Amino acid sequence: RISEAAATFYHAQIEVPLLRSGMSEAQVLQAANEAVAAGIPYLDRALASMYHGQSEHTWMANVVEAVEATLEKVGLHHTVAEPPAMCFLDLSGYTRLTEEQGDEAAAEMAATLGGLVQRSAYDYGGRPVKWLGDGVMLYFTDPDRAVISALELADSVPAARLPPPHTGIDSGPVILQDGDYFGRTVNTAARIASHAGPGQVLVSDTVVRSSQDPAIRFVDVGLVELMGLPHPIRLHQANRDT
């Protein structure tokens, strides 16, 4: 994927502009060969650094999940008094649309989504943690505000002519390292989002129990088995109380 992305970038951002500037294909090829030869040592170091960083990220997530599971088994896993909330939001049918409309349309959709998510998250005391191509992971200090932001985005995203989002929210302890969050809460929120339908905001029991906002109404969806979780969890659909 990295090689394909690099080749696409080179063609669109370097080769085509150079040809349009009047350089011949032979001149462009020579310039490319010189640039690649000079840049390979730096590229190798950069790729190695990214690999080691991603490996550390993955191992950290696995270790945190294992420790939390062990603590729960021995009865030492406790509930945080005012836990934060993790929210995952993905666009429905994004992959199909990018295949139909092309990369430029995909980039435009991502930029539009980014603006909407940034504004809504900051309005409600949250922030985007990382972007995932067709979606985003967000952190909120308050579960109710996470739900309100998600409901707002469920309306504003389709209004911007983007595919409707499907959203999952869980609340609980998380671990912060190198700007990213780890733990069972993160994994559960991601699994809930995968189960949600277009335009749907699904939340865990923990979010419902902590809710104090009368403007939010929850509808019990029932016990649901989610891939990667050891047992079924009860989900609720969040709506505005009109």
Image (tube, rainbow, N blue to C red):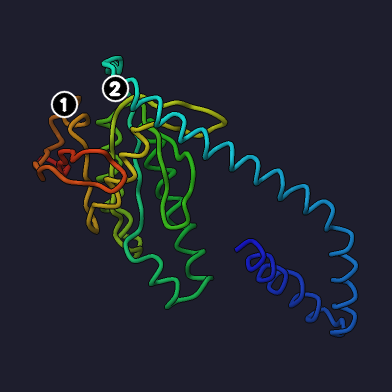
Q: Disc number at residue 72?
A: 2
**Element carrying mark 1:** helix
Residue sitting at x 12%, y 39%: 218
Residue sitting at x 33%, y 20%: 71
Q: Nearer the viewer, residue 55 or 174?
A: 55
- Badge 2: few (under 14), some or many (20 or more) residues near its Cα, within 10 Å? few
How far apart are labels 2 and 1 at the CA level? 20 Å
Q: Is residue 99 left or right of residue 152?
A: right
Say if mark 2 contacts mark 1, CB within 8 Å. Answer: no
Whole-percent x and y of residue 96?
38, 72
Q: Amino acid at mark 2?
A: Glu
Can see residue 89? yes
Q: Is residue 117 above or below residue 103?
A: above
Whole-percent x and y of residue 23?
87, 81
Q: Is residue 101 above or below residue 75?
A: below
Q: Is residue 75 above or below residue 191?
A: above
Q: Quadrant of residue 68?
A: top left
Locate the C terminus and report the quarter of the image it occupies. Answer: top left
- Badge 1: few (under 14), some or many (20 or more) residues near its Cα, within 10 Å? few
Q: Quadrant of residue 230?
A: top left
Q: Disc number at residue 209?
A: 1
Q: Nearer the viewer, residue 4 or 130?
A: 4
Residue sitting at x 44%, y 71%: 98
From the image, state whether disc 2 or disc 1 is nearer to you.
Answer: 2
Whole-percent x and y of residue 107?
51, 64
Q: Amino acid at mark 1?
A: Arg
**Element carrying mark 2:** helix
Whole-percent x and y of residue 132?
46, 51
